[in-house]
Amino acid sequence: VAIQVSNNFTAHPHGFFKSVAKQVDCLDSPRLFGRSKFCYFVPRSSIQMGKYQVMKPASEVDVSGVKYKEGDIKAPHLTGFLFKLFVKILEAPLIGSSIVDSLKKNNGMTEIFRNTVIPEEPMFRPEFPSQKPELDVVIVGEDESPIDRLETALKCLPQYDPSRSFHADPKSSFRYWKIRDYAYAYRSKLTTPSEVAKQIISIIEEFKYDKPPTPFLTTFDANEVRKQAEASTKRFEEGNPISVLDGIFVTIKDDIDCLPHPTKGGTTWLHEVRSVEKDSVVVSRLRSCGAILLGKANMHELGMGTTGNNSNYGTTRNPHAPERYTGGSSSGSAAIVASGLCSAALGTDGGGSVRIPASLCGITGLKTTYGRTDMTGSLCQGGTVEIIGPLASSLEDALLVYAAILGSSSADRLHLNPTPPCFPKLLSHNGGNAIGSLRLGKYTTWFNDVNSSDISDKCEDILKLLSNNHGCEVAEIVVPELGEMRAAHVVSIGTATLCSLTPYCEAGKNSKLSYDTRTSFAIFRSFSASDYIAAQCLRRRLMEYHMDIFKNVDVIVTPTTGMTAPVIPPDALKNGETNFQVTAYLMRFVLAANLLGFPAISVPVGYDKEGLPIGLQIMARPWAEATVLALAAAVEELAPVTKKPAVFHDLLSTNRIQPEK
C-alpha cells in the first residue's frame, strides 16, 4: 500500500496497513473506518493512504502549520434562458446527478465526505461547554416579562437627549431616527403612531413589482396597521404606553408567524399547506410590548440564497443603490429598516441571513447564540443552525428589540443549559467600561480575502481605532479547516431544509419553486446519510478548534462579507440566477456562527469607493451577546459618518415636527 505524506504529516507504515486497506475497500462509511480497531492516529500526524485521507484528532493538530486556502468556487454563473435550461437538465434523472457529482467533486466536497476519515464523534447541533461570566453586565431573567427586560435594557443605555435628534443643525450629518426618538415624539405629542402609520401606508401602497425599490413586503394589510396604530395612539393619549416599543413599527420576515398574515417563506404556495394559527413566540413578545407589526418582509425564497433575489414578489433593491442586491435571505427586513420605514425588523439567520443584508444595507444585524431565542412558530423551528434576530439602524435599537424577544424554549433550556442573558452597560457613548480588556482575534490572511481592499482596509481602520482609543489588543489567530466548515454547513442546513419540504415537493410543489431554489434542492438531494453524519463529525471538530481559540481571545473579528452589494443582472429579475462565486464572497466569514451556534453581529464601519456600505463582524464565545453588543457599540461610535441612502423616508422630519425648546 502506497502511503502519501504531505508537509506536516507523519506516516507509520506498519505491516497491518495492508489489512486496513483491504478493510476499507469493503466499508461504505469512512466513519466506520475511523473507529476501526485496525486504524490508529499518530499525534501531530495525518496519513493519506491511497485515496483515503485519515484526519488526526483536532486536539492533536498543530494549527501553527495550517496554511490558508483561498476559496475558489468552480460553478457556472447563469441567468435567463440558459439558467432555466440548466435547471431542467439538473433535475433530469441521469445527467442531472452526473452534473451535481461533478460540481461537488470540483469543489472538494467529494474528497471531504467520501474520501476522508474523521475521528470525532458527530455533534448534531451545537453543544457548549460551561462559560465564564461576562464583565460589566446586567443579568436579566429569561422568565421576566419582555416589558421588564426592556426597562432593564433602557437603564443600560446612555441618558436620552432629544436635542441630539430634534434640535440638531439640519445641515449636520445624516442619522437615523431611533426607537427612543419615536417614543419621545409620541410622549411629547409631536406626532402619533396613527400619523406615522398614515405616511408608511401611503409609501408602501405605491410600490410596484418591476420598479425600484419593489416590495419590501410580501403581505401587507393597511387596515390591520391602522388598527394597531389607533390602539397605540389611544394609549399615549391616556398616558399609558406599554413600553418604549409602544407605537414602534417592526417588520417580520416571511418565515416567522405573525397573525393575521400567512407565512409563505417567499414562495407562492407554502401558505396553502401550512396555516398560521397564532403568533410565533418572538412576535407575541413584541406584540405584548405594544410594537406595531407592519407586515411580512420579502425574502430570498425559503432562505435558499444570499442575494435576496425573489422572482415571485419582486427583488427588493438596496436603498443605497437600487440597481444592487440587498443581500439575503432577510432582504426585505434589511431594506425596510435602511430606508427609514421601520425602526427594526426581525430576520432569521441560518447562513448569515441577518448579518449579510445588514452589512450590504448599512445597518446593524444581530445573530444570537443558538437557542437564545425561541424559534417556535417559524419555518426554521427544529433547525440546528438557525436563529431569529433583530435588524435595526442602530446598536441601541438592536439591543432593545433583542431584550424584548430573547428567551430560550423549554427544550433548549434543558439541553443547552444557557447562561442567564446579560446586557452591556452602555452608560456612555463608547460601548461601556470593559471594552479595553477585550482581546480581538484576527486571522489576517482570511480577513484580507475579499474582492476589494476597501473592505479589509475599512475594517482594519476600526480595529486600529479600538486599540488606540480603548486599549483593545488585536491578537493573530488561525482558524483551521474553513473549507470543511463550508461543506459541513451546506450539508447540515441543506439536508434539514430538504427534509422539511420533501413531502410537498413530491406532491408537485417543486415545479412552483424558483429556479435558484430548485438548483439548491437538486444539490441537496445528492447528500447521503453518511455525508450528513460526516458533516456532524466536522461540526464537533470545528467546535473544538474554536473553543481553543476562545481560550486566548474574547472575540473573532472579520469583515461581515467578502464583497459589497453586487449588481442585479437584469435577466435575474424574472427568473433568478445561480452565482456561487457571489454566494461564496457573501458567506465567507459568517458560517462559524451558524454551524457552531456562536453569537455574532454586523455593524457598519464605512463605505467603499462606490459609496456602498461595509460591515464588520464580531463573533464571540457561546452566550456572550453582551460582549458582542458592547464592542459593537464602541465600533458604532468610532465609525465614519453615516451616509443617507438613495431611498430614504424621513418619517419624523424636523420640517414638519417642531418641538418646544
Image (spheres, rainbow, N blue to C red):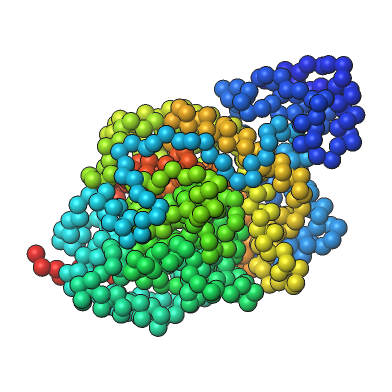
- Residue at image position (84%, 40%) is 28
Residue lying farthest to the bottom in this orientation: 223
- Residue at image position (33%, 36%) is 135
Q: Is residue 344 left or right of residue 549?
A: left
Compared with 404, 592 (above or below) is above
Identify the image quadrant of residue 433: top left
Q: Quadrant of the C terminus?
A: bottom left
Observer-nearest residue: 556 or 653?
A: 556
How many marks overall? 0
Identify the image quadrant of residue 500: bottom right
Identify the image quadrant of residue 544: top right
Residue lying farthest to the left in this orientation: 661
Q: In the rendered image, is residue 611 in sight?
A: no
Compared with 285, 583 (above or below) is above
Q: Is residue 644 left or right of residue 477?
A: left
Q: Quadrant of the N terminus?
A: top right
- Residue at image position (58%, 25%) is 63
What is the x, y in percent for residue 498? 69, 59
What is the x, y in percent for residue 645? 36, 61
Q: In the rendered image, is residue 92 in sight?
A: yes
Q: Is residue 232 left or right of residue 68?
A: left
Compared with 589, 397 (above or below) is below
What is the x, y in percent for residue 332? 47, 65
Observer-nearest residue: 206 or 483?
A: 483
Q: Is residue 248 left or right of residue 35?
A: left
Compared with 287, 600 (above or below) is above
What is the x, y in percent for residue 329? 54, 59
